[in-house]
Image: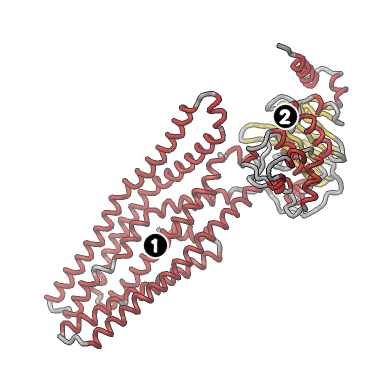
Amino acid sequence: MFKILKNFFDFCTAEDRRKFYLSIFLSFVQALFEAMKIPAIGVMVKALIENNVTGKTCLICLGIMLVSVIGSGIVKTKSTMLQTEGGYSTCAGKRMEIAEHLRYLPMGYYNANSLGRIMSVATNTMQSLENVATRVVMIVCSGIVTTAVITVMILIFDWRIGLVLCFGLALFFAVNSAMMNASAAMSKQKVEKDSALVARVIEYIQGIAEVRAYRLTGSQSRQLNKAIDENENANIAMEVKLIPFMTVQSFILKAVGTLITLASLLLYLGGTMELLTCLIMIISSYIIYAQLDTAGKYSALLRTVDVCVRNAQEILDTPQMDINGENAVPSSCDISAENIGFAYEERRIIDGISLDIPEKTTTAIVGPSGGGKTTLVNLLSRFWDVDEGRVTLGGRDVREYSMDALMRNYSFVFQRVYLFHDTIANNIRFGQPDAPMEAVIEAAKKACCHDFISALPEGYDTVIGEGGASLSGGEKQRISIARAIMKDSPIIVLDEATANVDPENEAELMQAVEALTKEKTIIMIAHRLKTVRNADRILVVDRGRIVQQGTHDELMAQEGIYRGFIQGREKAVSWKL
């Protein structure tokens, strides 16, 4: 239990950790106020025994009780505010820290880790920590502190009853330890089922078009329902397994309370305890364990808290790419690769590639699917780090630049465009949040999207759906190009940017690409003849190697993949029904 509490506090930020520690200290102060009820009861009981109940006695007793209740209420309010502020602040900060950490992880991380798991940590896990964990942690800490204070007071008051109290605490924590061990595996399973459910819901929603098109609604619904049922069963199983431990814990505390009453009576009857002390001990036996009983029931959730902390920390502990290079400006935009190699898990994807891309030239990369084209471009733009060799920009290893300094030189237009749930204007100025509206409109005009944007109900202030769902593929591509034009980087990477565009939008999109790439260094992955044939150099990549390179005419003059690729495309265009 105490190790879990330590892990949670270590997970918190330094400032929020201080809030939790202060809250625990206030719990100690609250325990002192709560303990004042015992002397208040003692004053009244003494007066009753001596048959000397007066108005003064009642006022003294009332005064002590008022100080106890009011002081406890004020301190508890402050303590609760501190723990609430600390919990929400910690989780908000950790969400931002996770987002910032994910930004600099190798792209391969996202192939190995499902979107559902990452989203579950950023949403479910952090929400559990801010809504449940902080309260559980503070209830447990408060219960332990309060019981410890009262135990010390009882030991001072009468060491014999204090020993009985300590015996009860030993039994309680023994059972609690067994409960914590029993909840360890269950908590992990519960969090895993939470993540699996999130992943399945995301998959179902994102693939709803395919599900309906192929009439898989029933099949996919069964999988989603299965994930929901498994999540429900995991939660129920955890509750069922822990209820017996909670029952035993509660029984022990009540039994020890009864034992304190019997011990007090026996000591009184044996003549070794005064009647006043006996009555105070009997009355106290009903309130000593109140908060510890509550803490014991909630302590089972500490394992879930621990799993949540570990899952979040696992992401934060994933090694980032080295982003702490110099904030340098390259002397040129020449890009080179020197015998680079890269493997993902056991599969070697890039195998000894060397190339030179002079600035302000266009290099097209073509080849069979799975040959390593996208991986090569990712290495050239440092989405991944090479395992062997080196990639240079302006004659300098890309790893010597800070990540932000390096990325200032690159703009990307991907085949699959992602637009954010925001206004069109903000999506275009994504790389320059403070850019004026005039610059946004100018970029949109160059990207050939000003006209369709102006025709929308709110124009540039139109809020588009998440991922750009409310726009066509060509419209999303042109907004993506406008975003790249706004960034105005000297190197443009086009990854199949025109692959899925309909013929009606192709002319405008090509015009937008031309505006984007003017006087730039261009690296493109493409299959379309119009896009490839005018490149200054074409690289044919297959099985992680460059198997051919040259201009369109040079490659067409030799046997190989490229000529077969072009001839196949030409035949496909000529097909008729």
The residue pinned by badge 1 equals: 139
- For this orientation, the residue located farthest to the top is 577
Decide which of 15, 502 is in the foreground and name it: 502
Q: Is residue 524 left or right of residue 94?
A: right
**Label 1: which secondary element:** helix
Quadrant of the frame with the C terminus: top right
Q: Is residue 34 left or right of residue 476?
A: left
Residue at screen point 69% across, 36% down: 342
Q: Is residue 127 left or right of residue 146?
A: right
- For this orientation, the residue located farthest to the left is 269
**Distance from label 2 to label 1 (Cα)?**
58 Å
The residue pinned by badge 2 equals: 501
Residue at screen point 39% across, 42% down: 234
Could you tell me if residue 388 is visible in this image? no
Image vertical order of residue 181 relative to residue 197, above or below: below
Residue at screen point 34% across, 47% down: 239
Query: Picture coordinates of residue 318 (x, y %)?
Result: 59, 48
Query: Picture coordinates of residue 424 (x, y %)?
Result: 70, 45
Mark 2 residue type: Val
Residue at screen point 86% across, 26% down: 551
Q: Are marks 2 and 1 in contact (CB under 8 Å)?
A: no
Image vertical order of residue 373 relative to residue 169, above or below: above
Could you tell me if residue 46 is visible in this image? yes
Residue 325 circle label: none
Q: Is residue 551 left or right of residue 98?
A: right
Query: Picture coordinates of residue 495 (x, y %)?
Result: 73, 34
Residue 480 is drawn in which quadrant?
A: top right
Mark 1 residue type: Ile
